[in-house]
Image (cartoon, rainbow, N blue to C red):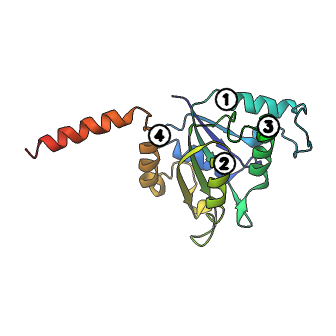
Amino acid sequence: MSLLSLSTSAAPNSVNYRGLLVLNELIDMGTIDGLHKYNIPVINVNGMEEVLPPEVDRLIKNMHRFDRFIFTVPEFTGMMSASTKNLLDWLVVATNMNLNHGKGYPFTDKHVIILTFTPSGSEAGGRHMEQTKEIFKKLGANVIHTEVFNYAWKNVIPGNTEPFKEAADRINNYLNYKPDQAKAFKEKYNEWNDQWK
């Protein structure tokens, strides 16, 4: 299954993009991309038949190629970043203003993991997460895991994988989950249970 790991920060030197690169040293993050690689304007349309800007269209078409997603979402003033919200708003325009609620998005009915890398201490960085998770779910995503990585300026450094090992194991477990896993889970249970007979 194909995986897109997308930083939704518009900054080319984003800690959220670089966090994906560090995690990729521990687990396969699939295709790593970032909004900073696209020239996406602030949403400026208000209709159902608007033409998408070429870069928005290119990003959305690229997103539709993937089966699973990891989004790194910056927190600004206790909310998801404006660049994240802008992307979601463009997705709404591209899907007929969401008349088929939660259908037609690149991540509709697909597994989504939402991460945040933040220079803040444990007091911040994740305040947006519940709202962000609910918005992604409203747009059809199956959000299976969220996680916040604090002290990013200290920890998100090339080769510094130690602070991320436990989280990488959790993320990898979620990435390895497959829809047909219920059968395998039952088989493992039966194997385990047979040992008690």
- How far apart in space, not on screen, are marks 1 and 3 (Cα)? 16 Å
- How far apart in space, not on screen, are marks 2 and 1 (Cα)? 18 Å
Among the two numbered marks 4 and 3 on one chain, the one whose residue lies closer to the N terminus: 3
Q: Measured from the top left, where is residue 190 in percent x and y?
A: 20, 39
Location of mark 4 (residue): 175
Q: For marks 1 and 3, give the one nearer the viewer.
A: 1
Q: For marks 3 and 2, give the one nearer the viewer.
A: 2
- Image: 186 above or below 196: above
Question: In the figure, residue 142 lies in which quadrant?
Answer: top right
Mark 1 residue type:
His
Location of mark 3 (residue): 38
Count of labels in the image = 4
Among the two numbered marks 2 and 4 on one chain, the one whose residue lies closer to the N terminus: 2
Badge 4: residue crowd in 10 Å (few <14, some 14–19, many ≥20): many
Mark 2–mark 1 CB contact (< 8 Å): no
Location of mark 2 (residue): 138
Query: What kind of element bears circle 3?
Result: loop
Label at residue 64: 1
Mark 2 residue type:
Lys
Mark 3 residue type:
Tyr
Question: Camera-side residue: 140 or 114?
Answer: 140
Badge 3: residue crowd in 10 Å (few <14, some 14–19, many ≥20): some
